[in-house]
Image (cartoon, rainbow, N blue to C red):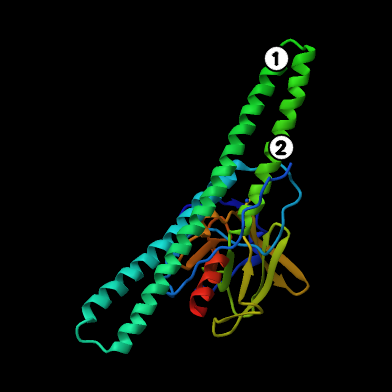
């Protein structure tokens, strides 16, 4: 996974010299109903390790801008669709394995075992149907958004054409109507963005620690700030004598957003002072995957200090469907 990073100028490197190494998305006519169902029945065990900079932020609502962001929505949609397809593929594979197991053991297995297996297969089939329905609703939202996007572009082209044509009473009246239509399309696009945001699920981030090459020593204290829009996760950690790292918090849950970047800032605490180690700005579109990811974030431009995080994306709709399946 490749990510564009923007580094701020770090603090004076002379202040952090070390001799030891450490490893360690007008108004809408209708709102889409939100009665979705989906279930998870398998635990993911494979954890891919990716050298990348992506992070998450907590629940925030972007009300500062009424200007739609179609390019950003397109990127988030593709990533979200890919993640949901990964869930669907994994559960389809699980269903295939259960079906094969049922065929192989039908001859000489106990009746009770076959009954439990058949019940598990029916639950998996219900979950897959609900997941497919959930994906179709996301696609409907995207299709509606693209329609409004094309209508707004058409209105903007007409507005540009009228602006270079001779001004008459008829053209001025047409221009007023075009401006009104363009505004309505923008409002509808923003409303769809807010609806899509509801279905982005949750990002769970677990702190794994700092990794430094001749930069971390016992007794060093660090402060990590992850900011996502108006939401923050601030934690402090200390390097122990046995090279273990002790952090005051280990995990946080953030709600992803369409138009926000993620900023990670790491500083070293020296008494009453804090020395900036580095700042990284990144976006979270690539976190929509069915499996947990180990993210290694280069805090300094040369990568002498890295931040290691474990990121897991959970779709709240999927979790709701899981509970429905277990209750039925």
**Residue 266 location in percent, x, y?**
65, 65
**In the foreground, 97 or 297:** 97
The CA span between labels 2 and 1 is 23 Å
Q: Specify few, some or many for label 2: CA neighbours under 10 Å numbering under 14, 14-19, or 20 or more.
A: some
**Residue 16 location in percent, x, y?**
63, 66
**Residue 275 location in percent, x, y?**
70, 65
Q: Which residue is mark 1?
A: 164
Residue 80 in view of the camera: yes
Ranked by sequence position, the earlier of labels 2 and 1 is: 1
Residue 22 in view of the camera: no
Picture residue at 71% right of the left edge, 32% below the top? 181
Q: In the picture shown, does residue 55 fall above or below 326?
A: above
The label number, if any, that marks residue 225 in the structure image: none
The label number, if any, that marks residue 184 in the structure image: 2
**Residue 167 location in percent, x, y?**
77, 12
Picture residue at 21% right of the left edge, 78% below the top? 104
Left or right: 254 with respect to 39?
Answer: right
């Amino acid at each position: 996974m490749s990510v564009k990073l923007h580094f701020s100028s770090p603090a004076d490197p002379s202040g952090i010299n070390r001799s030891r190494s450490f490893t360690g998305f007008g108004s809408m006519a209708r709102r889409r109903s939100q009665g979705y169902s989906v279930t998870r029945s398998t635990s993911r065990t494979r954890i891919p390790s990716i050298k990348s900079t992506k992070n998450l932020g907590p629940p925030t609502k972007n009300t500062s801008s009424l200007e739609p962001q179609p390019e950003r929505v397109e990127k988030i949609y593709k990533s979200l669709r890919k993640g949901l397809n990964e869930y669907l593929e994994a559960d389809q594979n699980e269903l295939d394995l259960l079906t094969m197991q049922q065929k192989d053991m039908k001859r000489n297995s106990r009746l009770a075992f076959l009954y439990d297996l058949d019940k598990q297969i029916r639950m998996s089939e219900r979950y897959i149907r609900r997941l497919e329905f959930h994906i179709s609703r996301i696609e409907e939202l995207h299709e509606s958004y693209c329609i409004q996007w094309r209508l707004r572009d058409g209105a903007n082209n007409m507005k540009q054409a009228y602006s270079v044509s001779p001004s008459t009473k008829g053209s001025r009246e047409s221009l007023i109507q075009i401006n009104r239509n363009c505004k309505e399309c923008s409002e509808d696009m923003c409303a769809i963005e807010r609806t899509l945001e509801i279905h982005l699920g949750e990002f769970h981030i677990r702190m794994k620690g700092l990794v430094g090459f001749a930069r971390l020593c016992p007794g060093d204290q660090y402060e990590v700030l992850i900011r996502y829009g108006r939401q923050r996760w601030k934690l402090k950690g200390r390097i122990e004598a046995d090279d273990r790292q002790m952090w005051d918090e280990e995990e946080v849950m953030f709600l992803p957003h369409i138009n926000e970047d993620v900023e990670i800032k790491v500083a070293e605490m020296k008494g009453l002072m804090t020395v900036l180690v580095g700042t990284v700005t990144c976006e979270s579109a690539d976190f929509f995957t069915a499996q947990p990811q180990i993210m290694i974030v280069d805090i300094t431009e040369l990568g002498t200090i890295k931040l290691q995080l474990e990121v897991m994306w959970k779709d709240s709709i999927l979790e709701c469907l899981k509970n429905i399946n277990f209750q039925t």
